[in-house]
Image: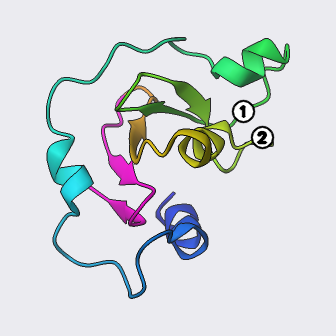
Amino acid sequence: MKRVLRRAADRIRVESTGPATVAPCDELAAATGPDPEARTPGVCEECTELDEQNWAHLRICLTCGHVGCCDSSPHRHATAHFEQTGHPVMRSHEPGESWRWCYRHAEMG
């Protein structure tokens, strides 16, 4: 999983011109409150609309609760959601996982 995220970090760096810093970015630091309610708990919102169930892992947007499939999935709806909305931080929506990811700075927290 970490290798996948590192590769994604290299592709996604939107505003950062240098390597990711050790200190968490402002967006990750601000994403400490209670998570929003998932709009489509347990399923990718767009894949469901497409009548597909072929995703690897789910991610939830910590701004609006959108649930999308990860970059290992065919449609990469979580990344597409960031690109469309600018909502920077998501976390894993998989049982037992609580890590968070900032798309803007390509940092894990």
Q: Earlier in the sequence, mark 2 or mark 1?
A: 1
- Asked which secondary structure carries label 2, the reply is loop
Image coordinates of residue 71 in percent, x first then y, are 65, 50
Amino acid on which the number 1 mark rests in the picture: Trp
Residue occupying image coordinates x 65% and y 19%: 45
Q: Main secondary structure of the magenta part?
A: loop
Q: Which residue is mark 1?
A: 55
In the rendered image, which quarter is residue 11 located in?
bottom right
In the rendered image, which quarter is residue 62 located in?
top left
Which span of residues is magenta-colored? Answer: 96-109
Residue occupying image coordinates x 35% and y 64%: 107
Amino acid on which the number 2 mark rests in the picture: His
Q: Which mark is residue 75?
A: 2
Q: Which mark is residue 72?
A: none
- Asked which secondary structure carries label 1, the reply is loop
Please check the rendered image and state whether residue 32 is part of the magenta-colored stretch, yes or no: no
